[in-house]
Image: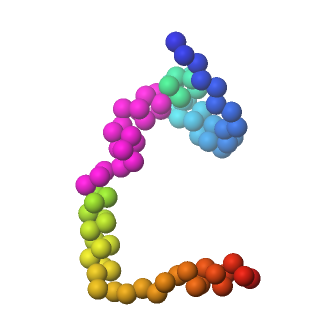
Amino acid sequence: MAQVLVEDIDPMILGKIEILAKQHGRSLQEELKHILQQAAENEAYHTGGDMAKAREAVARAQARYTGRTFSDSAELIREDRQR
């Protein structure tokens, strides 16, 4: 079976995972395997979320801004860069 080495884990995150492992009666390694398995099986994780909800949010934003005009931000960016 493959092995994975993960370096530079934030100690606070590791501590939280250790607490979860104790609560679930698992070793740290078993808890990490469980978390990875859940993430791999979660479809929303693979797609970045629910596409239907994302489309609805885009449609709401388009409706909110329909008919409005916005200034060109290029001039503001140029001014900001010169500071």
Identified at 55% across, 80% down, the residue is 74
What range of the chain is rendered magenta?
A: 34-52
In the figure, 62 relative to 82: above or below? above
Image spot of residue 19 (x, y percent): 58, 35
**Image position, residue 52 (x, y; %):** 25, 55
Residue 57 as seen in the image, left or right of residue 36: left
Task: Say whether residue 15 is visible.
Answer: no
Please tell me whether residue 49 is drawn above or below residue 28 in the rendered image: below
| Residue depicted at 72% across the width and 82% down the height | 82
Q: Is residue 38 above or below residue 12?
A: above
In the image: residue 67, left or right of residue 20: left
**As drawn, which residue projects farthest toward the right?**
83
On screen, residue 63 versus residue 30, left or right, reads left
Say left or right for 22 vs 55: right
Taking the spot 41% from the left edge, 32% from the top edge, the residue there is 40
Residue closer to the observer: 21 or 62: 62
x and y, in percent, of residue 68 in the image: 34, 86
SS majority, magenta: helix
Q: Quadrant of the C terminus?
A: bottom right
